[in-house]
Amino acid sequence: MKYFLRGLIPDPERRRVLLAIISLLSIYGLTVGFFYPLISLNMELRGYSSSLIGLMGALPFLASIIVSPMIPFIMRFMDVRRWVFISICSDIFFIFLMILSENIYIWFVSRFMMGVAGTILFVVSETWINEVAEDHYRGRVMGLYTFVFSATLGISPLFIVVLGAQGNLPFIVALVIIAAGLLPLRWTRGQTPDFSGGKASHVLMFCLLAQTMVGATALKAVEEALVVTLMPVYALRNGLTEASAALILTVAAIGAMAAQPLVGRLADSMNRNLLLFICA
């Protein structure tokens, strides 16, 4: 990744910051790809109903729907680097809370709050990438980011294969992984956009201006939610082991990993609406 960016981006300062942000999001991707199916499998093995498992899986996405419209406004109060730091620390705290207690209500609150933190982290970080990357290579940078992120999502269920889905150990490993996401923040000094004092547009206005992008993103989000949260439970109930259920997610990520570099290059060289239509 470092050498790809070196050939693409002549400015060493921009290159360093983009490498740091992509690394940070990739580490977070390890946590997401590991933690989401871990929760579903853990609840299934503890005998919770499908309704409760589905509700637990929906909470981060519900949090995203609620919080996303507020992000343009909250970004005015602090720079993006501080928001990323707060988001990661919040995730660390709520994973630790889930380790301390198996109370299902505490888990519900923790999952919702992790959804809030994750939404802020993703939106702020991807805004950061778009702000630092210049237009003539932005598509390839986003393609690289999506490829690496998809790779981490694909690899992360293998932690369940090794650690299982019961006991505190997999949760402790998830906590350590997300804490490691703080390390790349040290490399981001000097290219931190500050939106404080800026004018924030309402999210509905953005939806009207970018209907195609918003619609495509919404459909993709629904697909990701179903696959990551419910597919392992479906596999388990059809006689597969924990390890096999987790491996299904790894297989599902391979296609996404393979396509991203090509899609990124095409996005820089052809009509992007046409490209979206072809992909759909």
Image: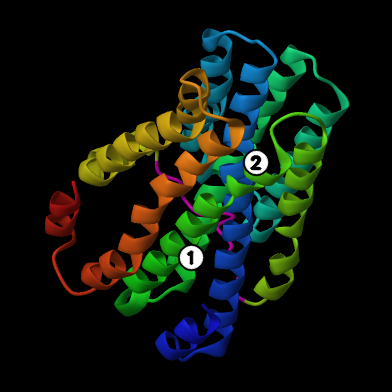
In the displayed structure, would residue 53 be above or below residue 135? above
Residue at image x 52%, y 11%?
Answer: 50
Q: Which residues are magenta?
A: 191-201
- The spot of residue 168 in percent (x, y) is 82, 33
Above or below, 61 against 137 in this view is above
Q: Residue 139 in the image: x percent, y percent?
A: 32, 69
Q: Quadrant of residue 22?
A: bottom right
Label 1 residue SS? helix
**Which scheme is used to colour this image of the protein?**
rainbow
Q: Which mark is residue 203?
A: none
The kind of residue tagged 1 is Ile
Q: Amino acid at mark 2?
A: Ile
Q: Which circle's residue, 1 or 2, is located before the other in the chain?
A: 1
Q: Main secondary structure of the magenta part?
A: loop
| Residue 159 makes an appearance in the image | yes
Check residue 129 in the rendering and tell me which mark sits there, or answer none: 1
Q: Position of residue 108 (x, y in %)?
A: 67, 19
Q: Which of pointers 1 and 2 indicates the residue nearer the eye?
A: 2
According to the picture, the residue beneath numbered tag 2 turns out to be 160
Looking at this view, name the residue that lies furthest to the right: 100
Q: Secondary structure at mark 2?
A: helix
